[in-house]
Image (cartoon, rainbow, N blue to C red):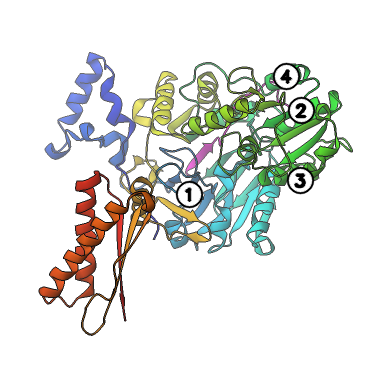
Amino acid sequence: MPEAKQKKTYGYSAKKNFYKQSEQKKVAKKNENKSVPSNTKNSKLKGNNLKNNQTKQRNTKHTSKKPIKIMPLGGLGEIGKNITLYEYDGDMLLVDCGMSFPDEETPGIDIVIPDFSYVLECKDKIKGLVITHGHEDHIGAIPYLLRDFNLPIFATKLTIGLIAEKLKEHRLLNEAKLNVVNAGSTVTIGKFSVEFIHVNHSIPDSVGFAITTPAGTVIQTGDFKIDTTPIDDEMIDLSRFAELGKKGVLALLSDSTNAERPGYTPSERVVGSSLETLFTKAEGHRIVVATFSSNIHRIQQIINQAVKSKRKVAVSGRSMLNVVKVASELGYLTVPKDVLIEIETIKNYPAEQIVVVTTGSQGEPLSALHRIAFSEHRQVEIMPGDMFIISATPIPGNEKTVSKVVNELIKRGANVVYEKMYDVHVSGHACQEELKMMLSIVKPKYFIPVHGEEKHLYKHSMLGMAMGIDSDNIFIVNNGTVIEISENGVNTSATVPSGRVLVDGLGVGDVGSIVLRDRKHLAEGGIIVVTVVVDATTREVLSRPEIVSRGFVFVKESEELMLQIENTVYDILESCYRGNVKDWNVYKTRIKDGVAKYLYNKTHRNPMVLPVIVEI
């Protein structure tokens, strides 16, 4: 079953006590509270400020406009798994449908997707899915949704191309309803008018949305930055955002990923200059560049430098191959004839004529770069002097895996360029000054930071307040919160199911907290399997208990310990036999508890003990 742990909702006002208020405002609040029932006066201390979340109400009996509801189902308090559900007058609209990657708390899991239970419950109301861009954290869960709900999908050309490739792998492409929409266009989906607005990001064809209903216009930026010198010469459409701001924007949902970083995010062209310098330094040696497969602008710059230095380019890694194929076919990647070669043919060229572009910039254990570093790659063997350029910054939590790969590459004689040794990576997300610029031109009535961990959302809310947005109109919410905006104000008291579903191989949602607990237990202490063969009629033991150790101790070097475990099992069996115990489950429980207790007293370790009773 999907895990759907719902966190407590906190409005921004719950955290506002950290800041001083003027005496005038304090007096005003004090007088205001006099008219509030005694059981709600202190609600601000609990994150339930009357103005902020749980009921901004006017004394109006009727309203001329119906409310719009915004329900983030993923992407808040986390990086990845982005999905947002909108509702107006009985119609619903989904924005993005992404996945996230597992961490140390989810051993053995392949990917993490949103809990679709509420989406499926409302599928008769949902009129379509719009996608901001083609990164996995925004499109990766689409195949899992389409298994149960075949809804129309609207996105730009490259994004549709990447979605189609993904659906083809899952054998869902033939039934999919894919619609290409150009940036600058507007589509009507149910009662929603959705305008696609071009933004800069680390993948082409990225857009933000202006979602308009009679309740007002809501802008969701998607992932963005303000790049005045983009590789494709298509700068973010700030003028359109400003026009919408002048007309009046009800609410802004804005990317918070880099809200902690001051200044501006550098242009992607900075990387091109660094690559040119490094290609010159690597003269006479092979070059291997690891980057995100979806960073098509980065791949284009690598190809451009390869052409300048008269090198061939080979691509390694399944996702990299897929993206290069789709981007080339759709015209987003320009590759001169005879520059791309198959990875199997690199042995036919001198090292100084080769550039390998690969996945694995985050040190993922099964990635192409990891296999190269540990001599497990079939086609690429490290040669002394090879230059490895890791063109990415480690995602928080991946620092150790990246460091492990770097150390192994250096050990094998490679020249490794990584992190900030050169400007070989720039972010695709806006820093503080760009976020402030977006706030200043959109001028939203209400501001909802999205796409980030709690600290990112909180910092972004500070920027909103610095730009003059009233703190009572800023909302830090959790996945599953229903943000209902109407003429009466904002209500965030309701919640809907949200959470995560773990994908392990072909299994979707069949791994839950109990399975994860057992996996952690096995990883930390190993397992002892105790097998006992007994007579089904007399209940007598017919042979010595068989003790198997995996991940606990090496049996051949721990014979004395194994013998003591056998003796412990014999004692437990004899006790059960004399006590006339007839339930085999009682036998198993006593063996499990008795062996576990003995092993902890003897070794201070806690392996999992698995008793098996075989009746003959």
- Say whether marks 3 and 4 touch (CB < 8 Å): no
In the image, what residue type sits under mark 1?
Val
Most foreground residue, 113 or 207:
113
In the image, what residue type sits under mark 4?
Leu
The residue wearing badge 3 is 325
Q: Nearer the viewer, mark 2 or mark 3?
A: 2
Disc 4 to disc 2, C-alpha distance:
12 Å
Residue at image location 25% in from the left, 23% down from the top: 17
The location of residue 510, given as percent across then percent down, is: 43, 61
Query: Which segment is the magenta one?
Result: 215-232
- Asked if residue 78 lies in the magenta stretch, the reply is no
The residue wearing badge 1 is 112
User: Is residue 202 placed above or below 181 in the rendered structure?
Assistant: above
The residue wearing badge 4 is 278
Disc 3 to disc 4, C-alpha distance:
26 Å
- Say whether marks 1 and 4 touch (CB < 8 Å): no
Q: Nearer the viewer, mark 3 or mark 4?
A: 4
